[in-house]
Amino acid sequence: MLEISELRKRFAGGPGAPEGKLALDGIGFAVRPGEMFGFVGANGAGKTTTMRIVMGVLQADSGSVSWQGRPLTYEGRRRFGYMPEERGLYQKMRVAEQIEYFGRLHGLSGARAAQATSELIERLGLGERRGDAVEGLSLGNQQRVQLAVALVHDPEVLILDEPFSGLDPLAVDTLATALQERCRGGVPVIFSSHQLDLVERLCDSVGIVSSGRMVASGTVAGLRAAEGGTLRVVVRDPSPGWADGLPGELTAEDGRQVLLVDAAGDDQEILRRAMKAGHVEHFGVEQPTLTEIFKEAVA
Amino acid sequence: MNALALVARREISTRIRTKAFIVSLLVTALLVGAAAFAPKLMGGPDSYTLGTVNSQRLPLEAAAPETEFTWKAFPDEGTARKALLDGDVDAVLVGGAKVLTDGEIDQELGVLLQSTNREIKLGASGVRIEPLRVESVGADTRYQAARTGIAVVLVLVLFMLLISQATMVGMGVVEEKGSRIVEILLTSIRPWQLLGGKILGLGALGLVNLVAILAVGVAASAGSGVATDFPPGMPGIVAGVVVWFVLGYAFFATLAAALASLVSRQEEVGNVMSPLTMLIMITYFVAFYATSEPTGTLATVMSMIPPFSSMVMPVRMAAAEVPLWQVGLAFALMAAAVVAVLSLGAKVYERAVLRTGARVRLGDVLRAK
């Protein structure tokens, strides 16, 4: 289990802001093996700072990161896979050569690095590009190489900062599949994203961060349950005033009336009154989307 | 293979196949080769055509054995004058008493004619003159011209190699920092491995360059015949150059890496490295001055103070005999300076290379815990 607890970080201020900026204000969460954790939050909320601290690229002012019950050290991090927010590849190096190089830096033997490189190139659909210099690749292909660099040494944990940004749907699928495979193999995967539909589709659990604090976290289903659904009732040609005294919000549209009400209330009473008033076309609880949960959480 | 060697190998393998590397190697080798032939091409005329009118030839060959003399006999002064004006002859000896020239006489030829003439006339009247015996009480200066030539070529080669390799180290550091590759690299290897590998790799390339240039220089000198003028102990001078290059490179490259790690964009590299470039330029100027005054006070003192010694000492060693204690002292001081710069530079690099964004102030880095 990867545990991040009580991280605090204040960036030194400049002449204009002597206070500096409080980037992390005690953020904490845990990711289990085989869990895909979606890290969401507005720009500047602290996602990248958290990931950089986990990877040891940045030092926290206080707080701790532990892996398998022990404080995370340099040796531990060497077995992590990392994709930084701003992509970093040698522009003039060839694709296969580059992936192999990073594999070897992580301690793989020449033969193992070459084999892992070939497999990844195949898996990520880079076969025709293996001898090309990185600078000649499309953004999507560069991103695939970047992911290959993070995966080449068969990492124990994956930390990916915005791995899907700027990708077309096909590339998103390729990358997502590769991540899901690793995840099924027992690797905890943390990735940040602004594409909430994607996070909702891929992730077992989600953490919503705002102003350097974790404001909501848990499984997507759990967050939905906590948020509660909205009961949506559509009645055709209802008798006027049927919803008087009921909570919620009533709107009318071409002969129908729509009632939206918190699903936590007495839905049976509402159903009885609706059926008495007219023809009930729709009666059901609608789950909030992650976007709605997110907006609610950071509001 | 350990990380240090992996990083060094990458530096070498990615640069060595670039066109720039191969072209610059060829061009420098060509220039050095040309320099080896230059004395042959640019030396003064070593052949004269002389005319005689009613006169005997003078035994000039005895006085100047390396110079070639061609003699032409003219029937009268008129034809001789015409030949002079046409440029067919350099001077005409008339009746053993007069020399006709077209304008000023070539200085060397004038002295030769006068002294040989005097000797012949004195000899004829029975006076024998023992030639003056020349004995040097100072250093052996027979090879001075060749020594100075070698020193001038060396100073240029050292300067070019040091500044280009140091710049390459700086650019490489910023390439990694600016593109954030360094963030991935430093989660798998230590900063000193990354820095050390880069310096070693680019240094090895510089050494390849240097050795190639030296080999071309020595081979071309042998080919052009210039090598016969070389002083004894050339192998020692060449080996010394390699050692001093290694020391100078280690010093300047480490500084380049430390300075470059303060900035995040390629456009800022030149600016942040300007103090270093200045330092190399000053070293170069002093070393160049030392080629003409290798035993002067300035050259002597600067050849022992790091980092100036890295260029001034090899130049002095080529240009003149240097007392062994001075070489030893210069080496010890420079080696100490390299160790100091390595430890300081590694510290700066380690602290600054992950601080992307605005330029990091050197003071902040050094003050940090």
Image: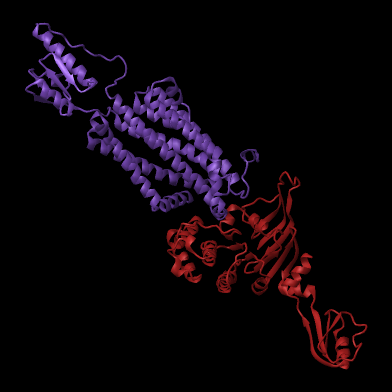
> Looking at the colours in the rendered structure, which chain would you say is drawn in purple?
B
Please name the residue shown 43% across and 39% down the image. B162
Q: Where is residue B102 in the image (x, y as percent from the top left)?
A: 20, 23
**In this rendering, position of residue B139 left or right of residue B244:** left
Residue A176 in sight in this render: yes
**Residue B37 drawn at (x, y percent):** 26, 36
Query: What residue is shown at x 90% (from left), y 82% (from top)?
Result: A246
Residue drawn at 31 percent across, 42 percent down: B30
Q: Quadrant of residue A203?
A: bottom right
Q: Check the image and tell me how it is coloured.
A: by chain
* Colour for chain A in the figure: red
Could you tell whether B85 is left or right of A189 in the image? left
Q: Is residue B260 above or below residue B308?
A: below
Q: Position of residue B290 (x, y in %)?
A: 40, 26
Q: Viewer-proximal residue, A243 or A223? A: A243
Q: Where is residue B262 in the image (x, y as percent from the top left)?
A: 58, 44
Left or right? Give the position of B326 relative to A55: left
Q: Where A48 sits versus A228, above or below?
A: above
Kindly give the residue lying farthest to the right in the view shown: A245
Query: Is A40 situated above or below A169?
Result: above
Q: Residue furthest front?
A: B78
Corner quadrant of residue B70: top left
- Numbered disc total: 0
Foreground pick, B142 / B305? B142
Q: Quadrant of the C terminus of chain B?
A: top right
Instruction: State the residue in front, B147 or B5.
Output: B147
Residue B193 in sight from this viewpoint: no
